[in-house]
Amino acid sequence: MAKKKRLLAPREEIAWYPTIDSDLCNGCGECAEFCRPGVFALGSAEENAEVVKRPKMTVANPYNCLVLCTRCVPVCPSGAITLPDPREFERFVEYVD
């Protein structure tokens, strides 16, 4: 059985969340559909005025992201999602049974 994670600092103080490269994002929405905590959302038309076909995805709720979760990265077909180096964030997490 996998151990559970417990945060050692308030979530708002931990800068663990994805970033989206708008040049790579194709606006498919796979990330939003996949992410249960609701980190991603479709950007507004104003934010994406230069986009011809469809709006790009945004990180709408960054602090909903589960610290050290990386499951969204392989879901993105265009490779637009990146996360910080997890080694920098291990200090914020304690593993418990």
Image (cartoon, rainbow, N blue to C red):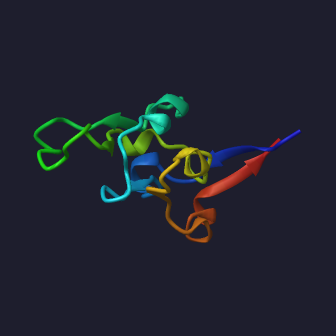
Q: Residue furthest right?
A: 1
- Tell whether 41 sits left or right of 4: left
The tally of labels here is: 0
> In the orientation shown, which residue stands out farthest toward the front?
53
Please state if 44 lies on the left or on the right of 15 as rendered. Answer: left
Which quadrant of the structure image shows residue 46? Answer: top left
Give the answer, above or below, for where 25 lies relative to 54.
below
Q: For the N terminus, which image quadrant?
A: top right
Residue 60 rendering spot, x and y as whole percentages? 32, 39
Q: Residue at x 17, y 45 (%)?
A: 48
Q: Out of 7 and 42, give the one closest to the viewer.
A: 42
Q: Position of residue 68 (x, y in %)?
A: 60, 54
Residue 59 horizontal/vertical position (percent) = 35, 45
Please provide percent x and percent y for residue 55.
Answer: 25, 39
Q: Nearer the viewer, residue 41 or 54?
A: 54
At x 37% / y 46%, what residue is drawn?
A: 26
Against 77, residue 23 (above or below) is below
Q: Is residue 97 left or right of residue 28?
A: right
Figure quadrant of the C terminus: top right
Instruction: Give 96 or 81, whichever is nearer the viewer.
Output: 81
Q: Residue at 62% of width from left, 70% of height from top?
A: 87
Is residue 36 shown above or below 23? Answer: above
Q: Quadrant of residue 45?
A: top left
Return the residue nearer the eye: 22 or 96. Answer: 22
Q: Is residue 17 above or below residue 3?
A: below
